[in-house]
Image: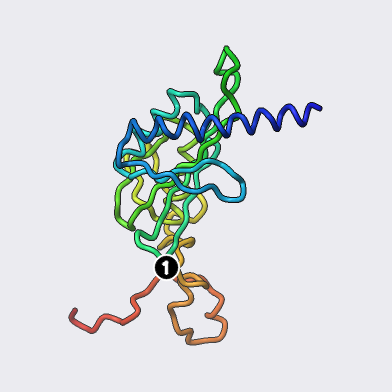
Amino acid sequence: MANNAMQDRVNAARERVNHEVIPALLEAFPGQVEVIPPTNDQIPQVYVASAVHESVARWLKERGFHMLVDITAADYWPKREPRFELVYHLREMPEKDPKGEKGLGMIRIRVKLTEKEPVHTLSHIWPMAIAAEREIWDQFGLNIVGHPNLTRILNPDDWEGHPLRKDYPLRGPRALIKPEMPADENRYHPFVDAEPAKEGE
């Protein structure tokens, strides 16, 4: 019975997000938000223009979405332009709602980005974004502005490139060199120019 009650509460929260939260979001940001059909997990989701994604985040937090569950990114190269997406999962926190009318609602925010397009950090809204955004920059190289410490977090500080980009060499920098000796094949090498510079250039 307890499981059934919880599932009913989750379903009710999902319906409220679909029929109350998202319509209000569309009204608050006309032309900047687009509803997307849900995936198999049935989490309500929207595309948000990069210019307003920080404002949308504040708007949602003020309306009960106090928890940033996670942030990730995706690279759709070469099939789509803009090639990148930032993806945020937000959840309501039941203890933040004394009346017990909310809670358990989730929403997925997706932001399409080009390679150089700036997108503002959300670390000042949700501190847990600090580490997650560092990882996204480290792995995808997205242009996250306003971050307090946008440095490598998984790769060494002197690593070149962003390994989760679809056009990143499968074997990393070593894929770009022709080893002189067989043992060189599995050694780390920094990136080199595909065409060696001619003397005097």
Residue 78 higher or lower than 52, as above or below: below
Q: Residues within 10 Å of mark 1 (few under 14, many from 20)?
A: few
Q: Residue furthest left?
A: 200
Q: Is residue 106 above or below residue 72?
A: above
Q: Please count the marks in the image.
A: 1
Residue 99 in the image: state x and y as whole percent: 57, 12
The answer to whether residue 124 is seen in the rendering is no
**Which quadrant, please, contains the C terminus?**
bottom left
Answer left or right for 115 relative to 19.
left
Residue at the front extreme of this rendering? 19
Q: Amino acid at mark 1?
A: Lys
Q: Is residue 8 left or right of residue 45?
A: right
Q: Which residue is mark 1?
A: 79
Q: Residue at x 57, y 12 (%)?
A: 98
Q: Nearer the viewer, residue 108 or 171?
A: 108
> Which residue is rendered at x = 56% and y = 42% of the image?
43
